Amino acid sequence: MNIAVACAGNQVSGHFGHCENFMIFKEEKGVVVSKENVPNPGHKPGFLPNFLADRGVEVIIAGGMGGGAVDIFNERNIEVILGASGDAESAVNAYLAGTLKSTGSICHEHEHEHA
């Protein structure tokens, strides 16, 4: 299973779309076997959920996320875990242990710049 974490460096980002990078952890038999750092290719409404889904992500962990992104992840059958904080790998290990639960922290206020 591939688990992505929206990050600022190696820390869980407070907002999915505006994160610096994604850490993508590959899990096998409940253990992280590899991780990859992927720079955020840019925040465009609807783009990032599909970008991650196309990379084989099955779970996304973030501090917060807009409702539109949550809807797209749900359509792509990707589990959304919101309200996380701290070290990304620790968050993934907590998820794998069953102790990281989503708070459903959906961001309702967005200011998008459209060029």
Image (cartoon, rainbow, N blue to C red):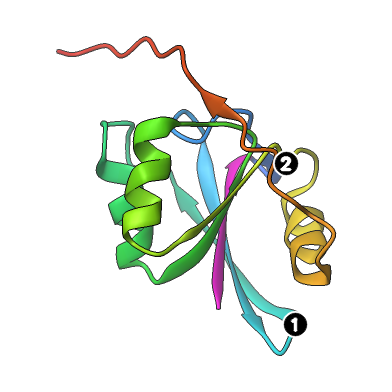
Magenta residues, start to end: 1-8
Q: Tag 2: residue type?
A: Ala
Instruction: Please tell me whether residue 58 is drawn above or below residue 42 in the rendered image.
Output: below
| Magenta span main SS | strand
| Residue position for label 2 | 84
Where residue 10 appears, as percent x and y from the top left, is 70, 46
Where residue 15 appears, as percent x and y from the top left, is 55, 29
Q: Residues within 10 Å of mark 1 (few under 14, many from 20)?
A: few
Pick the front one: 53 or 102: 102
Q: Are marks 1 and 2 in contact (CB under 8 Å)?
A: no
Asked if the stretch drawn in magenta spans residue 7, the answer is yes
| Residue position for label 1 | 30
User: On the rendered image, what quadrant is the C terminus found in?
Assistant: top left
Q: Residue at x 70, y 36 (%)?
A: 83
Where residue 7 appears, as percent x and y from the top left, is 60, 41
Instruction: Please tell me whether residue 110 is drawn above or below residue 33 in the rendered image.
Output: above
Q: Residues within 10 Å of mark 2 (few under 14, many from 20)?
A: many
Q: Residue at x 75, y 82 (%)?
A: 30
